[in-house]
Image (cartoon, grey):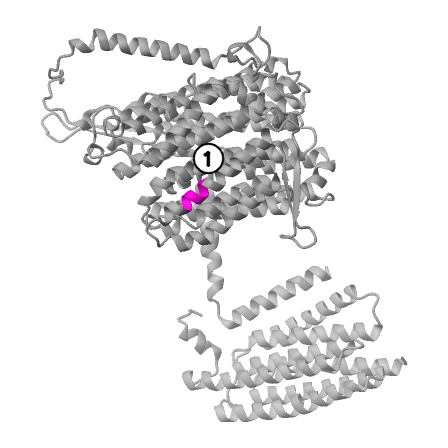
Amino acid sequence: MSSLQFDIAHLLAGSLVLASFMMLYQDRLYALLNVYALHAGVLALSVAWQAYVQQAPHLYVTALIALIFKAIIIPVALHRIIRRLGIHREIENVIGIGLTMMAGIGLVALSMVVMLRVTPGADALAREDLAFALSVVLLGLLIMVTRRNAVSQVVGFMSLENGLVLAATGAKGMPLVVEISVAFSVLIAFIVIGIFLFRIRERFDSVDVQALDRFRGERR
Amino acid sequence: MISVALWSVALLLSLAPVGIALSTRPRGSIVLYGACLAVTATLCIAALLHLFDPAHPVSSATLPIGLPWLGAHFRLDALSAFFLVVINLGGAAASLFALGYGAHEESPGRVLPFYPAYLAGMNTVVLTNDAFSFLVAWEFMSLTSWALVVAHHREAQNVRAGYVYLLMASFGTLALLLAFGLLANGAGYDFDAIRASHPSAALAGMVVILVLLGAGSKAGLVPLHAWLPLAHPAAPSHVSALMSGVMTKVAVYGFVRIVFDLLPEPEWWWSMVVLLVGGPTATLGVLYALMQRDIKRVLAYSTIENIGIIFTGLGLALAFKAQGLDWVAALAFTAAMLHVFNHALFKSLLFFGAGAVLEATGARDMEKFGGLIHRMPRTAFAMLVGCVAISALPPFNGFVSEWLTFQAILLSPQLPSWGLKLAIPAVGGLLALAAAFAAACFVKLYGISFLGRPRSDVAAAAHETDRFSLAAMFALAALCLVAGVLPGLFIDALAPVSKAMVGNVMPHQTGLQWLTIVPIAESRSSYNGLLVFLFVALCGTAAASAIHRLASDRLRRAPAWDCGYPDPNPAIQYSASSFSQPIRRVFGSVIFAAREIGEMPPPSSRAPARLTVELHDLIWEALYAPIAKAISFATEHINVLQFLTIRRYLTLVFVALIVLLLVVAL
């Protein structure tokens, strides 16, 4: 592998982490969705580049799936949901951008240390790729933890899943069937969550998950 | 021979579903207990034939059940055969008793299916030859007996007893599981492979401690006994007899099988541990028994005492074997095994008697009984035999085994180790104390229940029990006498067991003149049960006839001197608590933290004076209550985790993931 190929793969994976960081501090839902679309687009590019480097044509299919479903259909659908729910003007009070960003940096550092320690014998590209993928997964979890709005939790979950796809494509020889089934399960999860969003909204006039907690009689 | 045993077990297991069908039929219990009686009697005879076979064959079998590729291994040797005899003799007697007693069962559907399964479980434990099957059978036995303990689940105390029992049984199985895990290290789970392996001394020592915990909690060694006096009385009486008389012996089997058979040559400190647990168990068990008023609970605590005696015998055998005196080890081991057999006989007998009394009066509190000897004369006679036998009075069997144990204790000066030389006489002192207390305890039980005047209407209206129950009691009473009069026969039958476990046997007894038994040498000590029996019978008959002839004729009835209180109430008779008061005053203030509070009314008041006695179970309060409190505290606080918000759950998962990654990274 030439160093240019390696650098480009590195760049794309790094951009994915960067996009995750951007998602961390978006406090408006539309902005969050746009960054998510960007996130999925970068993922599609990254996967396509892996397909080219590894000469694995089936990865182009994965890239296409990512582009069509994750970068276009899901963001558009979520846009419509947000508009229909009438929450597009809502501002989320995230825990505090500085703190969240610090935590995110810590997570990236942690995943680097873990991956470098665990995979000393692996291919350099795969190592970098896995480290970035783990960062994306952890950042996705961080988004889910720090958000109160159900829609943004869904977006966090989707970005987490992008990290998984990145990890899967970085490792050579991942069968297409697995990727397609992962993609479909995410789609189904998206549909189910979307339906639930409307159900929650119908009942509580809000998709703030705190309403659910209040309903269960919990003290915050 | 093993095929007979395995087929019998299979038959008993298949009787369990039949029991479900029979539980709704009017005479279903008779059919089921009859079938159990037939199977257990057959198995008992088969095991006896195996034990008396001069060739002492060992037969084994492997069935393709259990763990894949390993199968279940079964083996019938002298030790298994002896314990099969104990189990099935007890099982047959209990089934015979239940032919009559089971008809009064109010919820047969909760007893009939589990009873044969319980018998099958106990039989399987002594037949297995690999750790996996052993533990499965052990746990099966525990679970079926638990189901029988909570058979009368409407009473809150039975449910509590079942709960405590289940916890302690799981604890015991855990200890045994760990012991087998240590033993199987490198050798595998087959007992034959474990026997051939040579574990290091430290590992073997740990196994001994774990087995003492595991088997000891099942047998009722202090301080692991807390469940036993709760669970044994809670079950229906014939099951109580099985649990107390037989299942504790299965626990003894587990201990003997692992410590004497599977482990290599013992070390002297093993015996120290066993002796220091066994001696106090005997004394404390009987002291607890003396303080009770519930007749079945007295018997359950007395089981703890007898388990203490058995474990003391086993500890002595370990001590002498470790120091190379295997002829004394054979004596101590035979004494322990004989006591296993004897205790199974008389404890079953006593529980049957208690069951008959319970069925006749509907009460278990001894303070409600009295004068039952006139209303239930046959039961009273059988109970008298049981009480004399368990009090270790000649000419009955209890005396023989305890006497043999003391013979082994008296040989302790021959041991080279100073620690044992000092400890064994102390343990002997505890045993002697326990024997005396046991006599007092059963004088109390018999005197308060059967003698005197009825203390309640139910006791006055009691009636004799049915003929099946009486047959079971009299059969056991007769066996108690036979084993007491002809102990040589039983000692010789135990020779192959002792040969296999401690490598030596007691001298041959049956050829001696006048059926005497001589444990070591004629010059040291000998005992002749037959002569003692004849002497006791002769003196008793002579005294009775003399009194009858000389005194009964001059009988005249007159009002007794009534201390100035006319029309005495039966309640002012000597009561169970007043009987045990002297012993409670001497020992109770330390062991039970007993306090007596007397309230005297002022001179002009007509209010009654009151005497309140407070007893504390210090072992429960110091050991069990803190553990229970800590566990309930922890569960109460962990329970909060059940009701978190979605985000908190996500945070928990996230934090857990981060912590795990940090562990990997650092």
Give the answer, above or below, for where A47 lies relative to A142. below
**From where the camera sits, is residue B638 visible?**
yes
Q: Which residue is mark 1?
A: B90
What type of secondary structure mainly makes up the magenta span?
Answer: helix
Relative horizontal placement of residue B455, taking residue B234 as reference (left or right):
left
From the top left corner, tell me how far across and down residue B157 is, in percent. 35, 45
Residue type for callout 1: Gly
* Between B224 and B516, the one nearer to me in the picture: B516
Residue at the image point whose x is 54% and y is 10% from the top: B513
Which segment is the magenta one? Answer: B32-37
Q: Position of residue B423 (x, y in %)?
A: 57, 20
Which quarter shows the N terminus of chain A? bottom right
Quadrant hosting residue B532: top left
Q: Position of residue B443 (x, y in %)?
A: 33, 22
Is there any visible trace of residue B629 in the rendered image? Answer: no
Locate residue B72 relative to residue B343 in the image: left or right.
right
Relative to B233, residue B433 above or below: above
A216 vs A45, left or right, is left
Left or right, A8 with reference to B35: right
Q: Are there few (<14), some (14-19), or many (20+) residues within 10 Å of tag 1?
A: many
Residue B321 in magenta? no
Q: Residue at x 61, y 85 (%)?
A: A187
Q: Choose between B463 and B646: the one closer to the eye.
A: B463
Give me the chain letter of mark 1. B
